[in-house]
Image (cartoon, coloured by chain):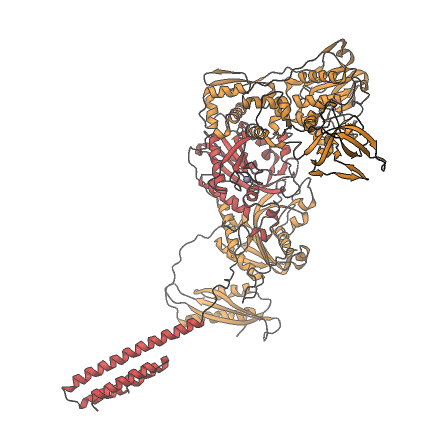
């Protein structure tokens, strides 16, 4: 048998062996057997010594060709088998992706915090400072400096927890406003503050009353602040909390620390103003009190009301949350039932 | 204040629906609680004429009546009222009619006799029992003789009226009267109101001064005005129906002609009046003064009251007979036997009346008006009008003249305001004419000089005395809807959270991402709970006059509130609860009433943070998990000083073996641990882990100045050590020793195993650590590391007797 024929035979036999190798190990064995240093091809090449110089290059070239062919076939087969193995493994690893994912513990902010945060951010964007006053306040700041002297009939509107005759739990976060007013340096620009926080009233807890609740009060004082500015600001508040399509209407009211005083109503979000049970068929919901700062309040803080003026407003996040989410009992906010708290999922 | 629409029409030409009128009042003046329609929901209730009334044969109190209800044949109705009689006009609820309280009346049989409906009393038509005149309370109501059988009864009882229920703010006391409301609506609708006139005839024979002697000892501030009139030979009897209707539609009970007349004038003018039985006054001597300690007075409601030195009292011959402006005395009350009336018209100080009403718990229509102010210019008119009305209704005569105890020269207030100022404050561009027109509608006499309006405020609007008050008048009558909506202009300001506010917000987010949900608990709690878990000793700030002991003291800690929250959830079958709270606690300060308010952050976890899931068991909360949460949080604060945890058995409410105080450097900042099982039981919670941190202190502590550390290019080498060591020796001690003996290249010491189970001798435990060595500047030589490591091992052996394994 000529060397060429021998090579051809080895090639055909090799290709057949490669094809029939059904596991990687066998492919590797074929490779070692055929192409290894002691393999038949090497042996053939050794036998070339006996060939004529003319034949040598031909057989050499043919031997290389056979070797390459076999190598390619081995690589190919190897890939095939590897792929098959991967496919087999993947098939074995198939899972039910509809099974629930593993819980990662995640808490959430209280719904009232959500509302306060939302409003804080709105007002920070408009250049307001956030002010946290004390919850235990002097009667003088909570009432008298807000134009509510002792024995003022409007004090009936706010039943108060007293610690002593002169010290009380604040009934309004605006208790801190006289301090803001007297500490502000108006040469550095207007005073714009927002005071969110806890307040207390001497009320028996029931579905609509809580002895502890929250307030957010705002105050702006500058040389030229108008009631139209107040209306525009309150409209922004309503749009932020309820949505852009909501209107604000003002109507007369009374607070000793503002004059004129107004109550602000917002289009009922439940019926869009058509009238429903939530708004008692009026199409409007009362959401906050506001007004132009009373000249007496400015005077008592050493500010000339002839030169400076401003507006103030106050709203209750508890009431907002009740309206916005249809919460029917204010006590829910302070019982901290996780089934309640977890309903208001939102980033802080 | 309940305003009868029918009564309003005496003053103004108004034809719009009551709802629209109410809406207008609400948008322009004061809040309206609603429109009351007394006949709403009532149907087929008609006038009936009793033709025949015979006793029911099978009953000792029922009557069988044949009643003409305007139809061809009379109908038979069985009636149990004691006052039913033939010839009366009565209220008939026909078969299938609707009466008060959503009650339907059907044809029925009563003891064998057919009853085609029912004869009604006022309360059966839905009248509040408190408004029904006493003399008709026990029987059916008898309609006037001219009532037409078959017609609906409503117009005969004023039930066809519409009543606007206004919620008058304290500043608008002027609207607590028909006159004041009429003036207000006249301004709103630009009408000239027809105000009531007084038609008083005084007797030429009697001079009031001859019979009454009035002196006011109280000062002019407390009693600026005190007047009396005398009405003689009055017959006390029920008022005519028209007056009763006005009284009950105003929400008051008709009493008799004299009391009703004073109440009618009160409603009309807003001026409280008081009628005394003249014969009960000692010789007509009346004096007004402050009460003296120890004096007593039995008021109309039959209660004997201890008078206070702040109470203004009316006296007869110096004996108190009436609490001024609040409630009359029983002894001088007008009764059916009264013939002569001494009628008081006075002004009392608002604060004095407020105190008296408050101290004696006597809030009346009169006291409410005195507290909110009275039209000083109308007192005499109201007194005259009431005297005339009493004389008219009781067929008496008014003695000549008013007896003046004190009079007052009432001067109108004049306020100047400029057009510029109005537009400056409102943000409007109103013209001078537009503003002048508003003052004209208000009927405020005004003169204009260039930009300035000089406005004379009538005494009936005592709430107005400064320019801001006038701006409000302009704004509300111009209409708030017409104001533009703008935002403040002027110098821009920077808005941002301060460091504390930002830290609080960040803290909340970190707690939430660790799996805790924010709670907001009550700051007021019991004294015991307020003190529990307190980080350091402090007096509790207590309410002076709490409503209950449950809410009587300000908390010194947040944990007790969170435990209450946990208990609430556990009672509702929620086993896994993780809550945190951020809020104030209140530590007492020496020599001060006001406590120091400190921001705290606390957490409480019971059950598992991640409950059992398919294929994974629940991992119950333990000390190390909550400590991990706290440690992770503290790490985020980048504190300059090291955080250490020191075992503490000093917290009475905490597990003595599972609680650590937390220090930053030498500063105590909080604690973490397990709630004492006894305490947990008392709070009705299961095994619970908690922490409380002083946020105010943490925020103030120095922060690490953060700077980039180059990452070493050279490889690190690790060595593991496992040892048997006495139980008493803590991980912290071991780590400290390893760190101090570790040499320059020791980077980290990490605990990787704690074991005290099988094969560990009693009183010992097995600890295992990985020590990581690295050099910033060179590759470490193995031998050097081995040397350093062996130093650590021998230190552990020598100092702690550790048995290296
Ligand atoms: Zn609605």
Measured as percent of width and height from the top left, residue B72 is found at: 72, 29
| Residue at 47 percent of width and 38 percent of height | A236
Residue B264 spot, x, y in % from top left: 69, 22
Query: Is B45 drawn above or below residue B701 in the view shown?
Result: above
Which residue in the rendered view is the most extreme toward the front? B72
Quarter of the image where one finds residue A158: top right
Residue occupying the far top of the picture: B204
Q: Nearer the viewer, residue B718 or A205?
A: A205
Chain the render paints red: A
Say which residue appears at 36% left-offset and 75% top-offset: A82
Task: Report if residue B234 is visible in the image.
Answer: yes
Residue A147 seen in this snapshot: no
- How far across and how far down the image is residue B450, in percent? 45, 16
The quadrant the N terminus of chain A occupies is bottom left
Q: Chain B is drawn in which colour?
A: orange
Out of B465 and B167, give the one closest to the viewer.
B167
């Amino acid at each position: 048998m000529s060397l060429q024929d021998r090579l051809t035979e080895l090639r055909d036999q090799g290709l057949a062996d490669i094809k029939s190798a059904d596991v990687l190990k066998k492919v590797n064995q074929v490779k070692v057997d055929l192409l290894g240093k002691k393999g038949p091809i090497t042996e053939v090449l050794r036998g070339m010594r006996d060939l004529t110089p003319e034949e040598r290059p031909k057989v050499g070239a043919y031997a290389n060709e056979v070797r390459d062919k076999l190598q390619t076939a081995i690589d190919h087969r190897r890939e095939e088998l590897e792929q098959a193995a991967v496919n087999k493994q993947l098939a074995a690893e198939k899972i039910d992706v509809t099974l629930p994912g593993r819980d990662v513990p995640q808490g959430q902010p209280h719904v009232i915090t959500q509302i306060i945060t939302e409003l804080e951010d709105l007002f920070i964007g408009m250049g307001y400072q956030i002010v946290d006053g004390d919850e235990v306040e002097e009667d003088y700041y909570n009432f008298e400096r807000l134009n509510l002297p002792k024995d003022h009939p409007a004090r009936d509107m706010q039943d108060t927890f007293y610690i002593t005759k002169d010290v009380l739990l604040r009934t309004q976060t605006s208790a801190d406003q006289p301090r803001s007013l007297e500490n502000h340096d108006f040469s550095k620009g207007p005073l714009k503050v927002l005071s969110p926080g806890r307040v207390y009233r001497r009320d028996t807890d029931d579905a609509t009353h809580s002895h502890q609740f929250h307030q957010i009060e705002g105050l702006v004082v500058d040389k030229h602040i108008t009631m139209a500015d107040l209306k525009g600001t309150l409209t922004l508040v309503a749009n932020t909390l309820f949505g852009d399509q909501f209107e604000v209407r003002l109507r007369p009211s009374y607070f000793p620390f503002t004059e004129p005083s107004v109550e602000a109503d917002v289009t009922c979000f439940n019926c869009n103003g058509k009238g429903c049970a939530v708004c008692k068929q009026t199409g409007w919901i009362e959401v906050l009190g506001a007004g132009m700062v009373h000249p007496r309040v400015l005077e008592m803080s050493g500010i000339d009301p002839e030169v400076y003026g401003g507006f103030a407003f106050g709203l209750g996040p508890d009431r907002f949350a009740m309206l916005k989410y249809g919460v029917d009992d204010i006590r829910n906010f302070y019982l901290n039932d996780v089934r309640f708290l977890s309903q208001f999922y939102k980033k802080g | 204040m309940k305003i009868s629409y029918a009564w309003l029409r005496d003053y103004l030409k108004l034809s719009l629906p009551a709802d629209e009128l109410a809406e207008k009042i609400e948008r322009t003046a004061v809040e309206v609680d609603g429109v009351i329609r007394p006949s709403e929901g009532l149907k087929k209730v008609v006038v009936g004429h009793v033709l025949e009334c015979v006793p029911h044969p099978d009953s000792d109190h029922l009557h069988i009546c044949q009643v003409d209800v305007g139809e061809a044949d009379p109908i038979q109705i069985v009636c149990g009222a004691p006052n039913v009689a033939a010839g009366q006009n009565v209220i008939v609820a026909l078969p299938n009619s609707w009466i008060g309280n959503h009650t339907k009346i059907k044809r029925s049989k009563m003891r064998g006799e057919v009853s085609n409906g029912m004869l009604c009393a006022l309360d059966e038509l839905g009248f509040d029992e408190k408004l029904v005149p006493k003399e008709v309370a026990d029987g059916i109501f008898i309609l006037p003789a001219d009532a037409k059988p078959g017609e609906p009864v409503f117009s005969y009882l004023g039930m066809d009226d519409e009543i606007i229920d206004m919620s008058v703010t304290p500043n608008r006391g002027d609207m607590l009267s028909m006159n004041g409301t009429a003036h207000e609506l006249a301004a709103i609708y630009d009408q000239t109101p027809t105000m009531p006139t007084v038609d008083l005839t005084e007797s030429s024979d009697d001079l009031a001064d001859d019979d009454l002697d009035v002196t006011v000892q109280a000062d002019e501030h407390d009693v600026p005005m005190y007047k009396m009139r005398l009405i003689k030979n009055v017959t006390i009897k029920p008022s005519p129906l028209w007056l009763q209707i006005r009284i009950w539609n105003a929400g008051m009970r008709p009493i008799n002609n004299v009391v009703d007349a004073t109440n009618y004038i009160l409603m009309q003018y807003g001026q409280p009046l008081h009628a005394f039985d003249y014969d009960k006054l000692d010789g007509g001597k009346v004096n007004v003064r402050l009460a003296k300690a120890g004096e007593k007075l039995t008021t109309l409601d039959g209660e004997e009251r201890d008078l206070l030195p702040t109470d203004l009292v009316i006296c007869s011959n110096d004996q108190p007979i009436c609490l001024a402006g609040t409630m009359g005395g029983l002894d001088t009350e007008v009764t059916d036997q009264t013939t002569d009336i001494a009628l008081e018209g006075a002004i009392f100080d608002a604060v004095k009346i407020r105190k008296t009403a408050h101290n004696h718990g006597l809030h009346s229509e009169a006291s409410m008006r005195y507290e909110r102010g009275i039209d000083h210019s109308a007192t005499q008119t109201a007194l005259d009008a009431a005297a005339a009305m009493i004389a008219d209704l009781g067929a008496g005569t008014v003695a000549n003249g008013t007896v003046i105890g004190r009079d007052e020269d009432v001067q109108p207030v004049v306020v100047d305001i400029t057009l510029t100022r109005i537009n400056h404050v409102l943000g409007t561009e109103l013209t001078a004419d537009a503003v002048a027109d508003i003052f004209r509608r208000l009927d405020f006499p005004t003169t204009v000089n260039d930009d300035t309006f000089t406005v004379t405020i009538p005494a009936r609007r005592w709430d107005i005395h400064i320019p801001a008050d006038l701006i409000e008048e302009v704004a509300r009558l111009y209409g708030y809807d017409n104001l533009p909506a703008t935002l403040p202009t002027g110098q821009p300001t920077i808005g941002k959270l301060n460091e504390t506010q930002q830290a609080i917000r960040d803290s909340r987010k970190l707690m939430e991402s660790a799996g805790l949900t924010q709670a907001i608990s009550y700051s007021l709690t019991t004294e015991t709970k307020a003190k529990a878990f307190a980080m350091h000793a402090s007096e509790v700030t207590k309410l002076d006059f709490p409503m209950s002991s449950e809410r009587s003291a300000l908390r010194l800690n947040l944990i007790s509130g969170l435990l209450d929250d946990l208990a609430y959830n556990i009672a509702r079958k929620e086993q896994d609860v993780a809550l945190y709270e951020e809020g104030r606690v209140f530590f007492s300060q020496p020599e001060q009433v006001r406590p120091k308010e400190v921001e705290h952050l606390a957490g409480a976890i019971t059950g598992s943070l991640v409950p059992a899931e398919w294929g994974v068991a629940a991992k119950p909360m333990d000390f190390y998990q909550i400590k991990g949460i706290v440690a992770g949080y503290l790490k985020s604060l980048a504190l300059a000083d090291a955080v250490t945890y020191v075992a503490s058995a000093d917290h009475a409410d905490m597990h003595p073996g599972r609680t650590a105080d937390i220090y930053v450097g030498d500063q105590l900042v909080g604690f973490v641990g397990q709630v004492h099982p006894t305490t947990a039981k008392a709070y009705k919670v299961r095994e619970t882990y908690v922490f409380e941190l002083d946020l105010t202190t943490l925020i103030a502590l120095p922060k690490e100045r953060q700077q980039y550390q180059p990452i070493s290019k050279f490889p690190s080498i690790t060595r593991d050590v496992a040892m048997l060591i006495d139980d008493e020796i803590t991980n912290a001690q071991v780590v400290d020793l390893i760190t101090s003996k570790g040499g320059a290249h020791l980077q980290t010491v990490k605990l990787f195993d704690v074991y005290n189970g099988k094969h560990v001798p009693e009183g010992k435990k097995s600890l295992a650590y990985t020590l990581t060595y690295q050099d910033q500047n060179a590759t470490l030589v193995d031998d050097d590391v081995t040397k350093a490591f062996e130093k650590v091992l021998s230190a552990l052996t020598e100092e702690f007797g550790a048995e290296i394994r």
